[in-house]
Image: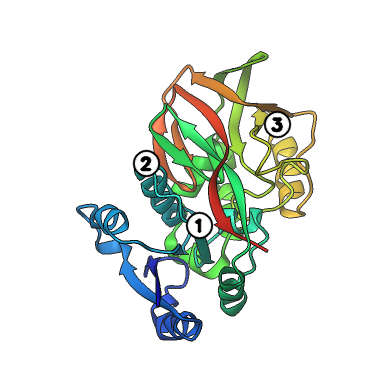
């Protein structure tokens, strides 16, 4: 029998993955694949890295949100593990799964993996240290996401971030942002910026309609400091799954960039807390192989 590993986060999303393990293992076993489960929440000493390096797995399956996928993909990329990655999305937003048009239905996820079709996707690299799959962002929306209650996210999903953002509008402050790409430099009083690898971020689609996860380029959106009513208009476009094209939004593409600000700003990397500014970011074209339709 071929062997594969299922790395799962039992605390992601509605925490229902634990009740589905037997069904998942059964589906793969019926196709001649012995699927070994690994509970990532207990991996305090990076045992997973050793397990992945020592075993000849045909592929890796990850179940969790974007933070879980970030952790697993970093282990694979840093260790030179080049087997395909399968995705069973079970987090709050599941942006990377949405970028790849991977559905939320469990059996459809498994079908995609068992059919064996793969695509190669770009990854971002921050300060030549850590990779990301879907987004790297900083500013007011990021601070809101960190302060959103887990129970609210569980009950309302991505909409929870919008509800929290509405309560924080009066306290939003801009920063002087300097963004240097390989082609241009932008200095702007800004509320936030986001670097994305596809059209989805924070559970919302079509943020940048022309974004492509395999072109080797990052799509960057910078929201200028603006009136609350203008910010609400941008919010509404996001909620309506429209492009954020707006006079108060700067969008551009780049292979690499450097970002700094006039005050401390912590970043969100694939939905989890990342480093503070300043940072250097570059994209690596088609660096990761994943199962997709």
* Residue at 45 percent of width and 31 percent of height: 126
Residue under label 1, please give it: 84
Please report whichever mark, 3 or 2, sits nearer to the chain's N-terminal start: 2
Residue under label 2, please give it: 78
141 above or below 73? above
> For the residue labelled by badge 3, is the local secondary structure a helix, a strand or a loop?
loop
- Seen from the viewer's position, the closer of residues 286 and 263 is 286
Q: How crowded is mark 1: few (under 14 residues within 10 Å), some or many (20 or more)?
A: many
* Residue at 52 percent of width and 21 percent of height: 259
Task: Give the number of callouts.
Answer: 3
Quadrant the N terminus occupies: bottom left
Q: Do the residues labelled 3 and 2 touch (CB within 8 Å)?
A: no
Please report whichever mark, 2 or 1, sits nearer to the chain's N-terminal start: 2
- Residue 174 occupies quadrant: top right
Q: Are marks 2 and 1 in contact (CB under 8 Å)?
A: no
Q: Where is residue 175 in the image (x, y as percent from the top left)?
A: 54, 23
Q: Is residue 221 left or right of residue 66?
A: right
- Residue 210 occupies quadrant: top right
265 above or below 215? above
Q: Distance from label 3 to label 1 (Cα)?
A: 46 Å
* Residue at 48 percent of width and 86 percent of height: 30
Q: How crowded is mark 2: few (under 14 residues within 10 Å), some or many (20 or more)?
A: few
Q: Distance from label 2 to label 1 (Cα)?
A: 15 Å
Q: Where is residue 17 in the image (x, y as percent from the top left)?
A: 43, 76
Q: In this view, does 37 lie to the left or right of 168?
A: left
Quadrant the C terminus occupies: bottom right
* Disc assigned to residue 227: 3
- Mark 3 or mark 2, which is nearer to you? 2
* Disc assigned to residue 120: none
Q: Is residue 206 left or right of residue 263?
A: right
């Amino acid at each position: 029998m071929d062997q594969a590993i299922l790395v799962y986060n039992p605390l992601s999303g509605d925490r229902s993955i634990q009740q589905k393990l037997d069904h998942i293992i059964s589906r793969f076993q019926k196709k001649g694949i012995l699927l070994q489960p690994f509970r990532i929440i207990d991996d305090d000493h990076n045992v997973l890295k050793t397990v992945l390096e020592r075993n000849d797995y045909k592929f890796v399956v990850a179940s969790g949100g974007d933070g879980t996928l970030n952790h697993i993909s970093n282990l694979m990329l840093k260790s030179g593990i080049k087997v395909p990655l399968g995705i069973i999305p079970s987090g709050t937003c599941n942006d990377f799964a949405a970028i790849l048009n991977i559905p939320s239905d469990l059996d459809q996820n498994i079908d995609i993996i068992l059919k064996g079709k793969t695509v190669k996707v770009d990854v971002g690299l921050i300060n030549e240290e850590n990779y990301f799959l879907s987004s790297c962002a900083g500013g007011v929306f990021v601070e809101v996401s960190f302060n959103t209650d887990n129970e609210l996210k569980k009950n309302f999903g991505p909409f929870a971030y919008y509800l929290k953002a509405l309560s924080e509008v009066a306290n939003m402050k801009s920063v002087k942002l300097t963004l240097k790409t390989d082609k241009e430099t932008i200095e702007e009083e800004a509320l936030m910026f986001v670097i994305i690898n596809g059209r989805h971020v924070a559970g919302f689609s079509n943020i940048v309609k022309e974004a492509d996860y395999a072109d080797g380029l990052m799509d960057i959106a910078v929201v200028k400091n603006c009136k609350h009513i203008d910010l609400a208009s941008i919010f509404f476009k996001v909620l309506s799954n429209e492009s954020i094209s707006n006079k108060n939004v700067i969008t551009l593409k780049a292979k690499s960039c450097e970002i700094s600000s006039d005050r401390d700003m912590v970043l969100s990397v694939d939905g989890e807390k990342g480093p503070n500014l300043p940072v250097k970011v570059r994209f690596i074209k088609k660096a990761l192989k994943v199962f997709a339709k």
